[in-house]
Amino acid sequence: MMNMTRKQKICCIILSIFVVCGIGVIVGIPNASPDYRLKIVKENNDTWAYIIFLENTPVIYQKYIPAIEGNVAFESKKSARMAGKLVIKKLRNNESPHIKKQEINRIYN
């Protein structure tokens, strides 16, 4: 920074900060991913449900199979876990947590 006035130096520094910040936005520097946790619980009628926690707060309690008409419960711990893991994956990818019928069919096949 030869022969630059104080004002020019300050402008140069501010411009550099904007460029670095702009590159961070363009490149998409990831934020720390939210801490989602899955808990599988047995219901009173020998069916299963899942609870998804964000940090330590329950945000989703699902005792019925999503995308299936009516109130059809999870009959196995495994299917509840697989559905819950799928929802967490969607949440971490900033997608809607809704599960489609095709996705449920993949869990049960």
Image (tube, helix red, strand yellow):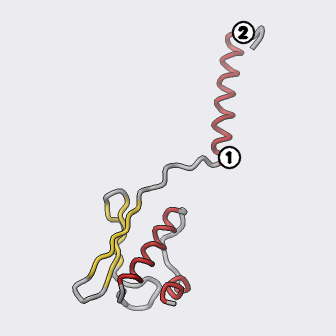
Q: In which quarter of the image is residue 54?
A: bottom left
- Of badges 2 and 1, the one in the foreground is 1
> Which residue extends farthest right?
3
Q: Quadrant of the image for the N terminus?
A: top right
Residue at 49% in and 50% down: 32
User: Which residue type does callout 1 highlight?
Assistant: Ile
> Is residue 19 found left or right of 97 in the rendered image?
right
User: Which residue type does callout 2 highlight?
Assistant: Thr
Residue at 49% in and 65% down: 91
Provide the residue designation for mark 1. Answer: 26
> Is residue 21 found left or right of 66 in the rendered image?
right
**Residue 34 % position (x, y):** 44, 56
**Residue 83 % position (x, y):** 44, 78
Front one among 68 and 79 = 79
In the image, residue 5 above or below residue 88: above
Q: How crowded is mark 2: few (under 14 residues within 10 Å), some or many (20 or more)?
A: few
Q: How far apart are marks 2 and 1 (CA)?
A: 31 Å
